[in-house]
Amino acid sequence: MTDAAEQISHFESIISMDQCIEPKDWMPEAYRKNLIRQISQHAHSEIIGMQPEGNWLTRAPSLRRKAVLLSKIQDEGGHGLYLYSAAETLGISREEMIDALQTGEAKYASIFNYPTQTWADVGAIGWLVDGAAIVNQISLQRNSYGPYARAMVRICKEESFHQRQGYEIMLTLSRGSEKQIQVAQDALDRFYWPSLMMFGPHDSESAHSARSMAWKIKRETNDDLRQKFVDQTAPQIQILGLRHPDPKCIWDPERGHYDMGEINWEEFYSVINGNGHCNRQRLEHHIDAHEEGAWVREAMQSYHEKKKQQSYAKAS
Amino acid sequence: MRQCNHDRVRFIMTKAHLELFEVFIRSRRGLDHKHVGSLHAEDPAQALEYARDTYTRCSEGVSIWVAKSSDICASQEADAESFYDPSDDKPYRHSSYYHLPDEVDNM
Amino acid sequence: MNNADLQGPSSRNQQVMQYAIRLGDDALVLGHRLSEWSSKAPFLEEDLALSNVALDYIGRARMFYGYASELAADGRTEDDFAYTRNEREFQNLLIHELPKGDFAFTMVRQLIVDIFNTHFLHQLEQSSDQTLSGVAAKAIKETRYHLRRSREWITRLGGGTEESQQRTQKALNSLWGYTPELFELDELEQQLCNNNIGVNNTLLSAIWHQQIADILTEAGLTVPENSWTVKGGRSGYHTENLGHLLTELQFVHRSMPGLEW
């Protein structure tokens, strides 16, 4: 065997034994690129995902909710950081990733282009959006790249409270006044379908699926994960006493799953392609904060240089 | 998308200024320090503080090490009470803090 | 000399309650301002750090309001204090309510408040009131960490670039006139002080000035002159900023009053 063929076969044998590829290991360039794309997109989603909930941070209706929400948003920032850190082991810098986000070259989850209009939306996001993310992330704890898998384990552990706090908001609202029940139903109606879209296109349409599955960068297909989410969510809606947004979501005893109506993929692609309420706003917010922070980062750098020079001067 | 303006150029020029640090945390007495990830900071002191803010938010640390990533040679294959106690009062970061009906299994 | 003794325990409780509300107001208003940095900090690590400081303050507000609600013993909760009082009823010191400004403004305010709080809370820890003393004991640990951060940042910003130096000096100049208020006592505070419950803020002035002057000088910044002073927070006489802060803070709660959230 040639060296290259040996490298590939070694790489593939590690993957087939369900072991992890680690940063210093040889890996095919396409595997590295694919991982960078997936991990950085995941990281950007965490970071941009701070904004829709952050929109309610200053208006949270109780001090307890305010503290919980701030912790949750802070966690999202932390999870973005874990993921950037995992991606950096693949030889890309955080600055390059942020640049790719800001120029539109890298993507983030399209769900965050939807506006949060009422306090109930904060509940719906925690419950549905985080719920969908967790289904995906649990499966990714077993992905083949060590730093990514470990970041996922950490993230899943910390996120256990995210979905519960969201559901608790919905529970409180749905047992509250007429008006509160109304906003809860409205938030469910607006966020249910976009949450299903978070799992991506049907397997038959998904561009990256097959190879990612073979490399174990993805462990379960979009449709399987979506089904899991639909199955776990239906009884939760019942407990809230709210109306299910999908009238076709009925238990099928033969399959052992809930059925689902067809997703409006036109809307999905339309929002991805820039027609969501907040696409431009989310990126501008990120760019503005970054540009406004430039002088602070420059000051740090300049201070750091001065300190270094002083210590050289002392040493010589 | 915004065009490449002055600020953007400035941002790109100053972008690689922070150093990368690796973070190791001892989560309990008797355990060893475990690598948990990395972060960016201006110097080791700031890296320690950010490690505290980033990696011990649920009070999962009793000791932190940071090391410049560039100082780590790899094979081819303390702080005061003010660091940790403040996280003790955030039970809402734990799922057991939320009381949901029994029917809501495994959330 | 000891008027409170003559006024009986219920009046003492009223006074301590007022005091707890004031300290809660300080913490809530500043925590709210700090939370406004979420997703807007100069870089990610600092975003998380600022959120931690904000969480400490919101937690502190809840402890003080929680104690106030215990003393009120009329069913009022922490949220009633935070969400149903208006501008004239809030009694925070003015420095806490000023808009977050740029990063230099936020860090200079933190430095001012953090130095003040290390001494204030140290004194409050000696309070004869067990609950206030307990809250102070917890809060001072957080504050020591906050001060460590704000001191390092001021050193960095002062010794960084010309721009950072200028922005920091400007923030300092525009905040300085709000600092004399930190060291005043009104009648209520004087009485609590006489009863070894409250802190005598006037005694903290000298050490505060000494400490901040040392830090500023080391950072190459100029200690501003005392050429103006604005005060009135403890009597509900606020800047226009507080009304807008409360409008936002209280909007949901007030739009559907009396409900669970």
Image: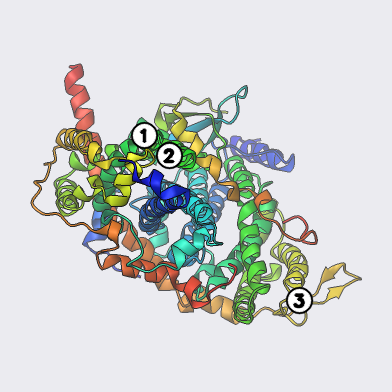
Q: Quadrant of residue A167?
A: bottom right
Residue in the foreground of this view, choosing between B76 and C229: C229
- Is disc 3 placed on a helix, strand or loop? loop
Which numbered tag is attached to residue C122?
1
Q: Are the numbered discs 3 and 1 placed on the same chain, yes or no? A: no
Quarter of the image for the C terminus of chain C: give it: bottom right
Q: Residue at x 53, y 29 (%)?
A: B62
Q: Are the numbered discs 3 and 2 placed on the same chain, yes or no? A: no
Residue beneath disc 3: A260
Task: Note whether C221 is above or below A240 in the view shown.
Answer: above
Residue beneath disc 2: C136
Q: Is residue B86 visible?
A: yes
Q: Residue at x 32, y 45 (%)?
A: C191
- Classify 10 Å Cα crowding around label 2: few (below 14), some (14-19), many (20 and above): many
Q: Residue at x 23, y 47 (%)?
A: C184
Whether pointer 2 and pointer 1 mark residues with C-beta atoms closer than 8 Å, the reply is yes
Horizontally, residue A271 falls left or right of residue A308, namely: right
- The picture places residue A280, in percent across and down from the top left corner, at 40, 72
The earlier-in-sequence mark between 2 and 1 is 1
